[in-house]
Image: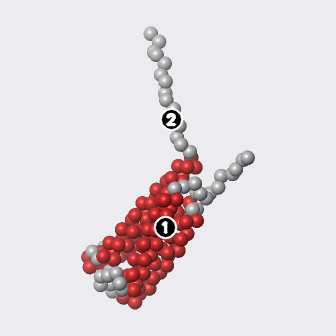
């Protein structure tokens, strides 16, 4: 029976997918804790606006963590791009503010985001490797020179 190729990634390691989902949910938890004031993030300029942004980030990571379980490669790619952009933006916005960058909240969220990014890149690379299949190595055989 002939089966068509699908863009889903049902045969990929569920351990890596579960790890990515767990890291996204962990980031969501950390952002929710920051929004509630439980996890310190330093002296930010506008506390009300920051709490709103952290709540939005928590909801986005929560939804992202749940959507990763669907196992669609394009969702992994979108997640990797958005996670990288969020991590880079937060770092860039607070680059000159050591009272924000050296807080438990920053370390917790950044660690979860960076590990999530690594797992997503692994999953994306593995998915493209499965499409192409294993590389066959061809050996070059040189004929003996004719004298």
Q: Position of residue 17 (x, y in %)?
A: 50, 61
Label 1 residue SS: helix
Quick one: 41 or 98, which is closer to the camera? Answer: 41
Query: As displayed, is residue 36 above or below residue 91?
Result: below
* Residue 106, image quadrant: bottom left
Q: Badge 1: few (under 14), some or many (20 or more) residues near its Cα, within 10 Å?
A: many
Disc marking residue 145: none
Q: Residue furthest front?
A: 15
Label 2 residue SS: loop
- The residue depicted at 33 percent of the width and 84 percent of the height is 44
How many angstroms separate mark 2 from mark 1 (CA)?
36 Å
- Depth-wise, is mark 2 or mark 1 nearer the camera? 1
Labels 2 and 1: the sequence-earlier one:
1
Residue 62 visible, this orientation: yes
Q: Looking at the rendering, in which quadrant would you find the C terminus? A: top left
Q: Position of residue 26 (x, y in %)?
A: 42, 72
Q: Residue furthest right?
A: 1
- The residue depicted at 55 percent of the width and 49 percent of the height is 130
Direction from residue 114 to residue 74 in the image, left or right: right
Direction from residue 115 to residue 18 in the image, left or right: right
Q: Residue furthest bottom?
A: 48
Disc marking residue 137: 2
Disc marking residue 21: 1
Q: Position of residue 50 (x, y in %)?
A: 39, 84
Q: Residue furthest top?
A: 147
- The residue depicted at 27 percent of the width and 74 percent of the height is 102
Q: Position of residue 136 (x, y in %)?
A: 53, 37
Residue 94 visible, this orientation: no
């Amino acid at each position: 029976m002939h089966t068509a190729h699908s863009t889903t990634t049902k045969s990929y390691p569920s351990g890596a997918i579960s790890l990515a989902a767990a890291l996204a949910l962990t980031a969501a938890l950390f952002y929710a804790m920051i929004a509630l004031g439980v996890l310190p993030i330093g002296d930010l300029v506008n506390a009300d606006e920051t709490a709103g942004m952290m709540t939005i980030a928590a909801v986005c990571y929560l939804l992202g963590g749940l959507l990763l379980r669907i196992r669609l490669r394009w969702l992994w790619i979108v997640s990797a791009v958005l996670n990288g952009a969020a991590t880079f933006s937060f770092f860039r916005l607070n680059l000159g503010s050591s009272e924000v960058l050296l807080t438990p909240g920053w370390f917790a969220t950044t660690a979860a985001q960076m590990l999530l990014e690594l797992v997503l890149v692994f999953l994306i690379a593995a998915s493209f490797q499965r499409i192409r299949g294993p590389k066959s190595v061809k050996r070059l055989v040189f004929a003996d020179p004719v004298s």
